[in-house]
Every structure is written in structure tokens, then in C-alpha cells.
Image (tube, helix red, strand yellow):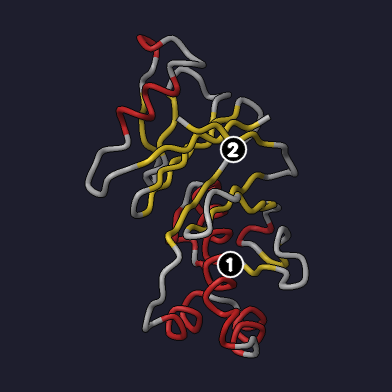
Amino acid sequence: MIDIWQRDWRPKQSSEPFLRQVLARYIPENDLIIERGEFGKPFLRDFPEWHFNVSHSSEKMLLAISDEMPVGIDVEQIKPRRSLADLVKKCFAPSEQTYWFNLPENEKLAVFYDFWTRKEAVVKGIGRGIALGLNRCEIDVNQPNHFLNLPNNENWFTQKIDISADYCAAIATPRIADFRLKIC
């Protein structure tokens, strides 16, 4: 079971105090030594079996914690952007672009954020971030929980997390997993 912690967040506020407070529920606080991998993903030096990932956007923060498998998480406030079509051309695979550009206009915003958060969660879970290439992470548009292609032929699955009508969030794991949402 993966725990996802949700809390209100203020922009420019550090996520580390919250991260340490929640991790201390699972691991003794004095043993929490957080280091960063080659591409910046944080990990617990003395507890490699524990995985976590944090994301924040506007006024929401999510933290995913697992002792079973790597995990990635992303949350984004849903808001119109002038550059959505340009981002789709740059960050979506060709099949995703075709799908998105053929959607009715009133569906494009929601689908953009749904795909974006799933892709971000995967690249964060793998530990490479967007340097991995979001356009190389191809979602199956008919089954968005699955990817048709990922770099290095990795297998990751995503699930949508419903936190509010104004936000889109997703969790990614290397195999299908259950999660529970905790609000604090």
C-alpha cells in the first residue's frame, strides 16, 4: 500500500519540513538522512527500501511514500495557458499529439493536464525528471494508465488521484499498486 499525503501549500514554502514530519511517522526522525541521486531525486540513505516523491502546485502539495516500490507523483493546478498547443508539440509523442489536436476544444485542457501529470509522475518515479524526455514517454490514449513506450523499455503504470476539481494529479509505480489518500 502506498500512502499519499495531501496538504495545503504556499508558493515558495519549503516542502522539506513537511517531508521530514511525515517520514518520521515511518522511520525514526534521527535516522532520516536525505540525499539526492545523480539526477536530483531524493532518497533515504540508510533506508533504500523506502521510496518517496513530492510534488506541489499553487496551493496543494502531495507526498507519496512506499516501502514496496519506487514511486513518482505529480500535481498541477488546472489553468488555461496560451502555450498548450506548443507544449503538446514539444512534450507529447506523435500519437498523443494526434489524439489531443483532434479533441473537442472543451476537452483539451483536462486531457492535457491528465497526460502531463502522468508523464511527470513517471519520469520522477524513474528518477530522471523531464531530462528523460516527456515526448519519449508515450501514453496509450485508449488506456491512459498504461504506456506504449518508455525509455529503456521500462514498465510503469499510472493512476489518477482525485483531490479537487481545480487540480490534476497522478501517481506512477513500476507495477499496479493500491494507494490511500491522507489529508493533513
Residue 158: give its label: none
Q: State which quarter of the image contains the N terminus.
A: top right
Looking at the picture, how far across and down is residue 6, in whole percent? Answer: 47, 38
Q: Is residue 72 above or below residue 7?
A: below
Looking at the picture, how far across and down is residue 7, in whole percent? Answer: 42, 37
Residue at 72% over, 37% down:
178
What's the CA distance linking mark 2 and mark 1?
Answer: 20 Å
Name the amino acid, label 2. Pro
Residue at 65% over, 44% down:
173
Q: Is residue 49 above or below residue 135?
A: above
Looking at the picture, how far across and down is residue 158, in whole percent? Answer: 66, 53
2 and 1 marks in contact (CB < 8 Å): no
User: What residue is shown with label 2?
Assistant: 70
Crowd band around label 2 with a 10 angstrom C-alpha radius: few (<14), some (14–19), many (20+)? many
Residue furthest to the left: 12
Residue nearer the viewer, 4 or 90: 4
